[in-house]
Structure formats: C-alpha cells, structure tokens
Amino acid sequence: MPRPIPTGRRAWIATWAGVCAAGLAATCALNTSSKPDPQPEEPVSARCAELIASVEKQLAKDEGDGKRDGVVAFSHMWSADEDDCHDALSDHFGGDW
C-alpha cells in the first residue's frame, strides 16, 4: 500500500520554507548576474568643464553667503556651433532635469 502524502502543518511549513528559500536564492543569483558593466566616464569638452567650474564656484559662493535654498536655474543661449553641455551638467550634479 502506498504511503499517503503528508498533510500535516509541519510538512506544509517546511515545503513553503523550501520554496521561499529557492526563490530568494534565484532572485539573488539573477540580481548579481544582471548588473550592467560600469560605463567609462566620457571626457567633457573644455567649454563644458569651464561651465561646470563656474556653476560650482557660484554654488560655493551662495552657500557661503547663506543663500542655499536648493534651487538651481540655468539660462544660456546655445549657438549652432557650440556643444550642448546638458549631459555633462546632469552627470556632474546628478540631477534629473
């Protein structure tokens, strides 16, 4: 006569614990294997580096004067031959703008 399938509370708890442990192990394995390779930092143009230095200088001056309120605004007209520094500014200051 075949042995009946255990239906006790301990058996169900042990089964669910095993399933959860396997799921966590699989999730950890997928998370560690799917990390993107770090992108090398692209060099910025000299004009963008000057603009970043100017912004940093202004922020340091405002912070020293006690004017730091968390709002930074830029106003600049770009000509067709100038390179756009939006990406360089965003990467440097870490903002989503």
Image (cartoon, rainbow, N blue to C red):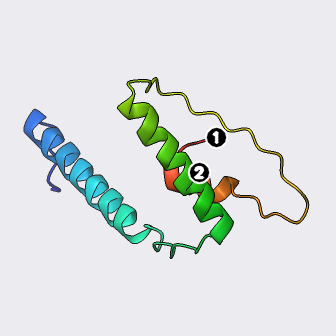
Q: Position of residue 27 (x, y in %)?
A: 34, 57
Element class at badge 1:
loop
Mark number, residue 55: none
* Disc 1 to disc 2, C-alpha distance: 7 Å
Q: Residues within 10 Å of mark 2 (few under 14, many from 20)?
A: few
**Is there CB contact under 8 Å for labels 1 and 2?**
yes
Q: Position of residue 21 (x, y in %)?
A: 21, 53
Residue beneath the point at 36% across and 33% down:
64
Q: Is residue 96 above or below residue 9?
A: below
Q: Nearer the viewer, residue 67 or 24?
A: 67
Q: Nearer the viewer, residue 39 or 58?
A: 58
- 5 relative position to 36: left or right: left
Residue beneath the point at 25% across and 48% down:
20
Mark number, residue 90: 2
Res 5 seen here:
no
Q: Which residue lies under the disc numbered 1? A: 97
Q: Residues within 10 Å of mark 1 (few under 14, many from 20)?
A: few
Instruction: Answer with the quarter of the image where residue 6 lies.
Output: top left
Going by the numbered disc 2, the residue's amino acid type is Ser
